[in-house]
Amino acid sequence: MVREPQQERSRTTRARLVTAAAECLAERGWTGTTVGVVAERAGVSRGAAQHHFPTREDLVVATVEYLAEQQISEVRRRAETLPRGRGRAEPVARMLLNLYTGPMFRAALHLWVAASTDEALRAVLAPLEARVGREAHRVAVELLEADESAPGVRETVQSTLDLARGLGLASLLSDDSKRRERLVRQWAELLEPVVGQGLTRRR
């Protein structure tokens, strides 16, 4: 039997722990997500878990980075199928307004709430969330092919992401899909003048 190289085993173990942590956060929240619980769910020893993540905060940082990377990679993958120019606003609006939904958003939300009263968690989470927020904004600009040097464009992009977070919160308690769809169509009209500005400018 060919043994898996140690570096690859280490990478696999780390990935399993981070995935398990994301699932635990979504289901149990911050208080129910301990290194021991995550290790058990990932099928690794507590010692192995603490070798990769000595503290729960270390595990959280890796988990937030993982969630952000997964989300942004999926958005970019789907963006490859979008039309250029006119007709792009609505699918982009739908994609962005659905950005903060599902179990991964729920996991992140648990962390935000916990960090509001936990100084140690807030100290590690706040700068990381700021970095993730900047990346989300950059991806939104790419999707819209927007020119942020034009007046009001940056604010429009940021408002889109803020609206998406608000809709994500609304969807946690009930099925908000019908209202969301109406908002997508309305918001697409607001985004239409923004779409393709950057692409036109580069020509």
Image: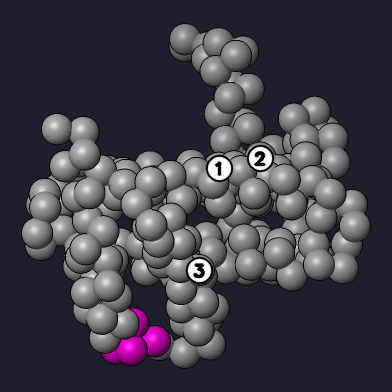
- In the rendered view, would you say 115 is above or below 62? below
Badge 2 amino acid: Ala
Where residue 160 is drawn, which disc sits there? none
Badge 3 amino acid: Asp
Q: Is residue 99 visible?
A: no
Percent position (x, y) of residue 172? 52, 81
**Residue position marked by numbered label 3 in the rendering:** 162
Helix, strand, or loop for circle 2?
A: helix
100 vs 114, left or right, is: left
- In the rendered view, would you say 150 is above or below 16? below
Percent position (x, y) of residue 60? 72, 47
First along the sequence among labels 1 and 3: 1
Indicate yes or no whether the magenta region holds residue 178. Answer: yes
Q: Residues within 10 Å of mark 3 (few under 14, many from 20)?
A: some
Residue range in magenta is 176-180
163 vs 190, left or right, is: right
- In the rendered view, would you say 57 is above or below 171? above
Foreground label between 2 and 3: 3
Q: Residues within 10 Å of mark 1 (few under 14, many from 20)?
A: some
**Residue position marked by numbered label 1 in the rendering:** 66
Badge 1 amino acid: Tyr
CB-based contact (under 8 Å), mark 2 and mark 1: yes
**Residue position marked by numbered label 2 in the rendering:** 62
Cα distance in 3D space between marks 1 and 3:
21 Å
- Quadrant of the rendered image containing residue 119: bottom right
Q: Is residue 58 visible?
A: yes
